[in-house]
């Protein structure tokens, strides 16, 4: 199983996802600033993977501390810089908070203990995510009928997580159980995570799939034969409203129209109980060039402008269930989510 990010001898190793599927380029990062750049430029992406990368980035901030430098100041600067990379995935802020707690706990125990404690916490966050993904896979696969055809969007696989996947983890588990017939994967404009990354992962696993243009989802669901729509999440509010890759809301409306179950699949680190509803979720807007061009080819005429929200919010009422490592959570989410996460 591919691990998109890991620690090796004082450095963060990271598979550059902007180069996939053409090239498998592994980066060796030795400063938190390089990790922040990698998150901002989406060399590592996907909510859980962003959190894990940031945790390793904070370990790096102390690991290579110059002689005589103040660990607290260095740590705070890195935490601030990493928190400014991408606003929507709450896993980033959740991981930074965990690292801050580890720093507070060990800051007076000497520099070498502090270094080991921070690296230990980052590795724990990473291990726990893989474990959660496996549990999510089992819970989610149990929801699918035999011979299922499913529809998904973006990339929620090993590349987007510590190493197994959320929605794609459910697909992986269902495939291992012999329950899955076919995956329909939305190409996922503008950054094409479906066409580039999900296709790359499914090919490696030999799981049968068809890529579809995002706009083909309506016709696909209207024709029947899709057992479920499975999507990941970047932030789930207390009432179940869910931010995920742009286009997810469209799939939820279509699934509702055609009576197809719509499942949000995410670890509990993606749930933000402090936000009462999706209205408060910050939605990242990225550069216009991502819409005006793709893979280095500019196809919009000179002078054309674009609007590029990277995520949308699906209202809780369109979500059949939320699958986490704590089990399958059903409405009313404002009661069941806090109870499941307590
Ligand atoms: O912009 P990205 O590629 O980071 O967006 C990723 C998604 O929207 C995923 O669906 C989500 O982070 C869940 S990944 C397990």
Image (tube, rainbow, N blue to C red):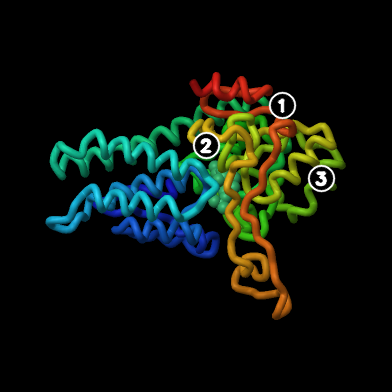
The residue that label 2 is drawn on is 270
| Mark earlier in primary sequence (1, 3) | 1
Q: Residues within 10 Å of mark 2 (few under 14, many from 20)?
A: many
| Mark earlier in primary sequence (3, 2) | 3
Are dots 2 and 1 in contact, CB under 8 Å?
no
Q: Is residue 97 above or below residue 159?
A: above
Residue at 67 percent of width and 33 percent of height? 263
Q: Position of residue 271 (x, y in %)?
A: 54, 33
Q: Is residue 13 above or below residue 279?
A: below
Can you tell which of label 3 and label 2 is closer to the viewer?
Answer: 2
Q: Which dot marks residue 145?
A: 1
Q: Position of residue 314 (x, y in %)?
A: 69, 40
Q: Quadrant of residue 294?
A: bottom right
Q: Which dot marks residue 260?
A: none
The residue that label 3 is drawn on is 220
Q: Is residue 126 left or right of residue 279?
A: left
């Amino acid at each position: 199983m591919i691990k998109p990010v890991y620690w090796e001898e004082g450095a963060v190793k990271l598979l550059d996802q902007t180069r996939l599927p053409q090239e498998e380029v592994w980066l060796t990062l030795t400063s938190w600033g390089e990790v922040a750049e990698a998150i901002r430029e989406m060399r590592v992406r996907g909510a859980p993977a962003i959190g894990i990368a940031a945790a390793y980035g904070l370990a790096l901030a102390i690991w290579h501390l110059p002689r005589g430098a103040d660990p607290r100041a260095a740590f705070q600067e890195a935490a601030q810089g990493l928190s400014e990379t991408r606003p929507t995935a709450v896993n980033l802020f959740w991981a930074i908070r965990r690292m801050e707690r580890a720093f507070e706990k060990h800051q007076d125990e000497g520099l070498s203990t502090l270094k080991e404690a921070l690296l230990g916490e980052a590795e724990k966050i990473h291990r726990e995510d893989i474990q959660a993904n496996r549990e999510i896979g089992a819970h989610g696969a149990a929801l699918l009928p035999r011979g299922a055809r499913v529809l998904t969007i973006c990339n929620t696989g090993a590349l987007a997580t510590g190493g197994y996947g959320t929605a794609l983890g459910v697909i992986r588990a269902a495939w291992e159980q012999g329950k899955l017939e076919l995956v329909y994967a939305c190409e996922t404009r503008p950054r094409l995570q479906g066409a580039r990354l999900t296709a790359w992962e499914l090919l490696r696993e030999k799981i049968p799939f068809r890529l579809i243009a995002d706009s083909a989802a309506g016709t696909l669901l209207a024709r029947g034969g899709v057992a479920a729509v499975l999507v990941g999440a970047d932030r789930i509010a207390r009432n179940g409203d869910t931010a995920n890759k742009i286009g997810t809301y469209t799939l939820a409306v279509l699934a509702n129209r055609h009576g197809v179950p719509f499942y949000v699949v995410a670890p509990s680190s993606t749930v933000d109980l402090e936000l009462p509803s999706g209205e408060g979720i910050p939605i990242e807007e990225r550069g216009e060039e991502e819409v005006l061009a793709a893979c280095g080819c500019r196809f919009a005429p000179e002078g054309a402008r674009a609007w590029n929200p990277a995520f949308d919010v699906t209202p809780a009422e369109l979500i059949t269930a939320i699958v986490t490592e704590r089990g399958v959570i059903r409405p009313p989410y404002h009661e069941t989510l806090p109870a499941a996460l307590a």
